[in-house]
Image: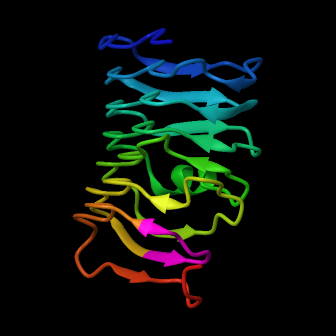
Amino acid sequence: IEMFCGCTELTGEFSFPECTGNNGGGAWFSGCTKIESVKMPLMTEIQGSSFNNCSNLKYVEFSKDLSFISTSAFSGCISLGGDFIRAMLNPEITQLGSSNPNSIFNGCSSFDGALEWNFPNLASTNIVGESYFGGCTSLQKVVFKTYVYEIREKAFCNLAPGAEIFMHPEPVK
């Protein structure tokens, strides 16, 4: 928990090839404004605030079996591009956020292109939480391939000018 939290002078690339499961309680690199790359190829869960405000983070690598991304995990990661975020958001995810889900990718202004909401395995958190993608000012399109139970306040606030959102055609159960 909070292993490198607040280390504002910590720079470079970090690789944890043997770490499996989850990263404990989270906030590993929270506030490390100069790190650029983190590789955890066996990590299947990302806990809350793990990379919060890592403003120079450009590259992340996690397991293809990533199943859980918690609240504020990447909030404020303004340099993290769409390709890396889309790679994390695979259809196998079973939980986004926690009991009060919010701000997972809030302020990720380099999240460009399109977001495809395609999570057929989401359990109790089948909602788009408060400010999940707020401030993603380069995000141009959101397509819901699976339905959600709720879209909360500021979930998509301040997307790219002219951004489009396409809802799932089936009614919510």
State the residue lying farthest toward the bottom.
169
Q: Is residue 17 left or right of residue 71?
A: right
User: Which of the image's four quarters has the C terminus?
Assistant: bottom right
48 and 90: which one is in front?
A: 48
Residue range corresponding to the magenta coloring: 142-150
Number of numbered callouts drawn: 0
Residue 141 belongs to magenta span: no
Using the image, determine if residue 103 lies above or below residue 54: below
Q: Is residue 141 left or right of residue 61?
A: left
121 and 117: which one is in front?
A: 121
Q: Residue 168 is drawn in which quadrant?
A: bottom right
Using the image, determine if residue 161 lies above or below residue 43: below
Point 51% across, 12% down: residue: 1
Point 38% across, 53% down: residue: 132
Residue 147 belongs to magenta span: yes
Give coordinates of residue 112: x percent, y percent.
Answer: 40, 63
Give coordinates of residue 102: x percent, y percent.
Answer: 37, 46
Give coordinates of residue 103: x percent, y percent.
Answer: 35, 46
Point 43% across, 46% down: residue: 101
161 and 50: which one is in front?
A: 50
Give coordinates of residue 148: x percent, y percent.
Answer: 52, 70
Q: Residue 73 is drawn in which quadrant?
A: top left
